Amino acid sequence: MLLSAKQDWLGNIRGDILAGIVVAIALVPEAIAFSIIAGVDPKIGLYASFAIAVIIAIVGGRAGMISAATAATALLMVTLVKDYGLQYLLAATVLAGVLQILAGYLNLHKFMSFISKSVMTGFLNALAILIFMAQIPELIGVTWHMYALTGFGLGIIYLFPYVPVVGKILPSPLINIIVLTSLVYFMGIDVRTIGDMGELPDTLPIFLWPDVPLNMETLLIVLPYSVSIAVVGLLESLLTANVIDELTDTESDKKRECKGQGIANIGSGLIGGMAGCAMIGQSIINVKSGGRGRLSAMVAGIVLLILVVFLSDLLKIVPMAALVAVMVMVSIGTFNWVSIKELKTNPTSASVVMIATVIVVVWTHNLAIGVFTGILIGSLFMAQRLSQFMYVDSKYDDASDTRTYNVIGQIFFNSSERFISFFDYKEAVDKIVIDVHRAHFWDITAASALDKVVIKLRREGADVSIIGLNEASETLLDKFAVHDKPEEIEKIMGGH
């Protein structure tokens, strides 16, 4: 464990520090923008980004991942802030953190296994589109200088890595920010800068317990918002962790990440910040800039605070063109371009799930709704496919006047009617054997289907027996099936 901690903090010092600086600069306009979305002062988002980034670096489960104030959580706060004000938002932030810690202890991260590759691809593609769309307002109604600077910045980002020696040492997004800021400042180019985004705080954050009544009324007000923030925050954080796992070919502790996100949000709420979660865009910037360890998130948070409180005059002159170029790079790198080609080769169901996830996320600007939609559609397709793999064949033994039905496949809510239809209820035979060695009964609908089959066949005078039940199916049927329980059948048929 000591070796792992040393690697997380000291295994990539230069890369983590440089990447953290890039992330810190890129966090500023986003934190301000997310504060505006939520309807609060810009310092609320900036303090949140500082607190969450620093705390998650220590307690999070994914080294190299950046967490801060995000649009996904900011969108959920609008009504609360409008109706009840900032203090209730801070209370909701603290409660959301408590719920996320509880989710960690309840191992709710395991539900991530329901997210298929198609949903993950759709999530990434939608996020790439949203990141790109968020840059469009910066490119509307501006002079040609903005376009020229953005294009120049993209050129630096993509070409600087090919420069001998230094191209491999310094992250190109940071060089882009330095070069464009120098050009704008020394040449006096009139373009929008970070200083135009809003007023930056000039004091350090302080401990601040939310000024709300500690009673049931307050709890009922903030609980719905806290639950939404906790769910959306964990979903985006765990999805981002999966993406960074793949990018770095490493594994992360999802349970620890849930708890870490909760602790970070509690810390944010207690210094006057809003709730947040992992940021896939900033995390990719971090990784692509060379960040791999916990040090990069720590540096990002500390440098962010230093920039906005002590070096605000310097920060204010950074042109938005430099940050737009970085975010366009992120959107291009995030989008899975191969998925477009795979639309022709992947199963139709997989393509539908991916496209539906993209459309819903982009339409609603809510990653959670889009992902849940993808999971739901994918589950329906899976249930339909599984039901088609179930069939029943039969053979008749004339010597013993016995019909044996061999059931193969999965019997559950979507295949139960098909299962019932395979049997001939009018055939006059002495004995019927239902062989389920190669079948599995999954739910109470399957148990009910078997009841219908057995009761119908016995009603026609056949001696019906069931053989080959596996242990799980037998346990289910013992609990819910009634075909071997005369008193229950009597109740069903209307007896007393």
Image (cartoon, helix red, strand yellow):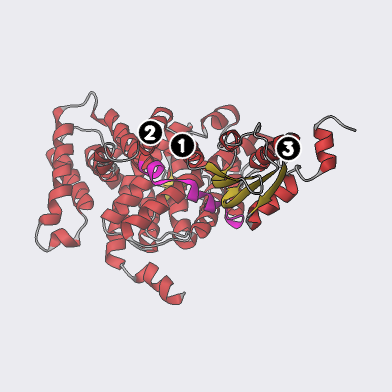
User: Percent x, y for residue 435?
Assistant: 61, 50
For residue 381, the mark is 1
Q: Is residue 40 left or right of residue 154?
A: right
Indicate whether 370 appears above or below 209: above
Q: Can you identify the residue that label 2 sits on? A: 352
Q: Is residue 236 left or right of residue 495?
A: left
Who's the residue at 70% across and 48% down the image?
Answer: 465
Q: Earlier in the sequence, mark 1 or mark 3?
A: 1
Who's the residue at 43% across and 48% down the image?
Answer: 239
Q: Earlier in the sequence, mark 2 or mark 1?
A: 2
Is residue 146 magenta-colored?
A: no
56 and 468: which is toward the camera: 468
Query: Magenta residues, as a range?
Result: 104-121
**Image marks 2 and 1: residues in contact by CB distance under 8 Å:** yes
Q: Residue 101 falls in which quadrant of the image?
A: bottom right
How far, Cα to Cα, is label 2 from label 1?
A: 10 Å
Q: Can you identify the residue that label 3 sits on? A: 455
> In terms of secondary structure, where does tag 3 sit?
helix
Who's the residue at 47% across and 60% down the image?
Answer: 61
Indicate whether 132 appears above or below 63: above
The amino acid at mark 1 is Phe
Categorize mark 3 by other alpha carbons within 10 Å: few (<14), some (14-19), many (20+).
some
User: Percent x, y for residue 320?
Assistant: 25, 38
